[in-house]
Image: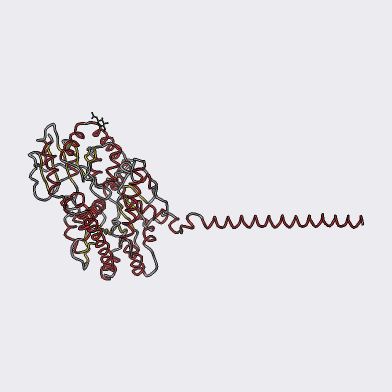
Amino acid sequence: MASVHFVFLLFLFSGGTGPAWAAKVLLMGPSGSHWLNLVYLAEGLIRRGHEVVSLVPSNLYDSQLKALNSPIRQKIRLEKYQVPVEGDVFDRMMQLQVQFSLGDAEDFSAFRFAKMVFDSLDDAVSFGRVECDVLLHNRDLMSRLKAMNFGIVIIDPVTYCGHIVARILKVPLAITATPGIATFHLSQASQVPVPIATYYCHRTGFVQSLKNLANHVMMAMMVSLMTRNIDSLASGALGYQVTFAELSAETDLFLNREDSIVYPPHPLMPNMVQIGGYQVQNASPLPKDLEDFMEASGDAGVVILSFGSYAKAMGRRKAEMVAAGLARVPHKVIWRFQGQRPKNTGENTLLMSWIPQNDLLAHPKTRLFITHCGINAVYEAMFHGVPMVRVPAFAEQHGNSDNLETLGTGVTLDIFTMTSDDLYEAIMEVANNKTYKSAAVRLAQLQRDQPQSPMDRAVWWIEHVIRHGGLPHLKSAARHLSLLQYHLLDVAALLCAAGVVVVLVLWLCCRCCCRCCCRVLCGKKTVAKQKQQ
Ligand SMILES: *[C@@H]1O[C@H](CO)[C@@H](O)[C@H](O)[C@H]1NC(C)=O
């Protein structure tokens, strides 16, 4: 009996530490925060004993290398390939977008700025195509990849080339999608129309509907721009006619970086798994100097400010404004800041070029978080029950902020118009009004109350795909249908035709009968007439 228990315990523990088998996983993504999101996933997979390989263009290597700052992350094997374009095009595009909101408005006219953004987007799109072409024609690399026998390819949606690579390698494909782009995948993969009016925000109403539609149209335009001309590239590389929409619908697994707390509930396919907050980890102790700083804040506590990994684009004037607002609050402040120290920086403010954000948010002295509402920052604050002052800057951050506003976890400031007084008042309001903290704690409790952590869920699903060599049974049968078939127009046409035939036959029968009757009656009449004569 005891030995049975022992074996059972052994089984339990082996389940907790890693699978009995190890697979090879291929990652593909651009730089910056997109790359970081893949690295988080890689950490979860490496902890489970899997081998992770990432394809990186050699010219992005430096910016990507920075994220590999721990022994576990350094286990990601980098497969480099030469791309004939200088510099990090994707990073430049992202920087420019952030500059619009965080930069000083007087630096550019709106028109010039729009043109710059469009040009940079165009550059990034062209670069994506060049990169993909070079990669697919690198026979050496492709045959090396083939020989590695990957169990799955996991891509960021920006790296659409991954669809083709997975097909060439004959390996199942997973996509880690941001909330904004998930709408696109939902409609591609399932043919289910996205409920635009209620998809983007818990709040409903006319203005919100307009915002939602604008958001949706912008996303659709972005995706179609990014995937422009990929059909020919894919068909050429695969040797048969195929469209990007078809490739995209064949994705085995969608790991959506969202949940149904921050985002309104909406329909999902069974191969679409919500992993919002998967990167949040249990807190580690702070370094001694930071811990001392936190403790020295006394009862007032500490305010944490971070505008995310692209915040080095912040303009001088805006930085001075923020510094002045922070200098007035009775709390201590830790500000993730890169660049020249603003003159208005107060005694209470500590500037750091990088912060252990998750550990700081988990600290009991932390009173509130000033954030740009990047989705990862949102989940870290949410997980630790920290109320927020939200200053959304670009992309899906405005949508994240709108949703959080309806959930009552803090107040929102407008990045374009805010003053140092606004910032001061917002901090004081969120720090002193208990409703924000209690709303934040409620969200934390909801988020933690799940049968498995989002990371465990992500890893389980990835292993599930690998174990079964793809999940064709979970893909919507509708992906093979044309619009005409999807809406049953072919069936409707047949039914209509059948109806017409039936009516026609009935009509002919009636006419026939009538004629016969007529003839019989007329015949009788003539007979009668003849008799009378
Ligand atoms: C606290 O905040 C809530 C939500 O914004 C508001 O309804 C309430 O009036 C505030 N309480 C005080 C005392 O300001």
Can see residue 280?
Answer: no
Quadrant holding the N terminus = top left
Quarter of the figure with residue 418: top left
Residue 449 occupies quadrant: top left
> The C terminus lies in which quarter of the figure?
bottom right
Image position, residue 359 (x, y; %): 18, 42
Q: Position of residue 78 (x, y in %)?
A: 21, 61
Residue at the spot 44% in from the left edge and 59% down from the top edge:
480
- Report the residue at 28% width, 65% height from top: 129
Quadrant location of residue 346?
top left
Q: 109 and 84: which one is in front?
A: 109
Residue 239 visible in the snapshot: yes
Instruction: Indicate the position of residue 350 as horizontal and vertical percent values.
Output: 10, 42
* Left or right side of 229 for 505: right
Viewer-nearest residue: 28 or 391: 391
- Comparing 476 with 496, the one in front is 496
Q: Position of residue 382 (x, y in %)?
A: 25, 40
